[in-house]
Amino acid sequence: MQPRPDSRITAGVIALAAIALLIGGAFAGLILEGAHDLSGALAAFDSYLLRVARFTLWQALLSTLLSVAPALLVARALSRHPAFPGRRLILQLFTVPLALPAIVAALGILALYGRAGYFAGVFAGLGGGEWPGIYGLSGILVAHVFFNLPLATRLFLESLGTIPADQWRLASQLGMSARPAFRLIEWPVLRAALPGIAGLVFMLCITSFT
């Protein structure tokens, strides 16, 4: 027996309220703890800390966008072309960031894009002058995309794998082109998975930076 849509909405609201209560309780505890010391409570609203918080949110939003949007396109391409010769290799390569230690990945990224990295030498050899490097926001974005784009791609690909084969057969019999097939068959599945995947990537980006 399938649960009614209104029961799903109610369950979602209850889960969201529980999460909000948990997070709000944690912040309330911090505020009450700092209430004994007014200077300590006001320190939470220091301009420097607010700038750090804004930058943290901004880089997490950019990292999520740069990871999730390409992942959706890559997952769709891999799903629509299961006989692609390099498909298995790509999926195997996508497992590397999930198992690779963060320090190893950071050293690898610096070896490629750092000021003394491979591309710096190529850039200088072409007469481009000094390589700007990837330190700062650009380095954070590159690292987050390296880790999270493969994860988001695999999650989107799993969601597309849940589409019944009957729908594809019916689309083929109707002579449906790629655009209507995406709008009527693939997009509803991707749209349902998008908030959860984007939320997961956002949390990974914001917590890994802090």
Image (spheres, rainbow, N blue to C red):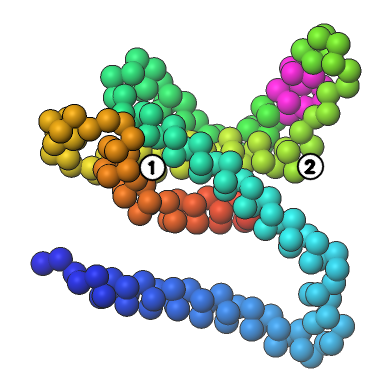
On the rendered structure, is 69 left or right of 178? right
**Residue found 83% across the figure and 87% down from its top:** 37
Is label 2 in a helix, a strand or a loop?
loop
Q: Residue furthest top?
A: 125
Horizontal and vertical percent position of residue 3: 19, 69
**Residue found 86% across the figure and 11% down from its top:** 127
Where residue 88 sits, quadrant-wise, is top left
Q: Is residue 160 visible?
A: no
Q: Which mark is residue 148?
A: none
Where residue 159 sits, quadrant-wise, is top left
Q: Main secondary structure of the magenta part?
A: helix
Asked if residue 74 is positioned above or below residue 56 in the image, the reply reads above
| Residue 59 vs residue 206, the one in the foreground | 59
Q: Amino acid at mark 2?
A: Gly
**Residue found 37% across the figure and 34% down from its top:** 76
Q: Which mark is residue 156?
A: 1
Query: Marks 2/1: CA distance?
Result: 30 Å
Where residue 29 sits, quadrant-wise, is bottom right
The tag earlier along the polypeptide, 2 or 1, is 2
Position of the N terminus, as image quadrant, is: bottom left
Q: Residues within 10 Å of mark 1 (few under 14, many from 20)?
A: many
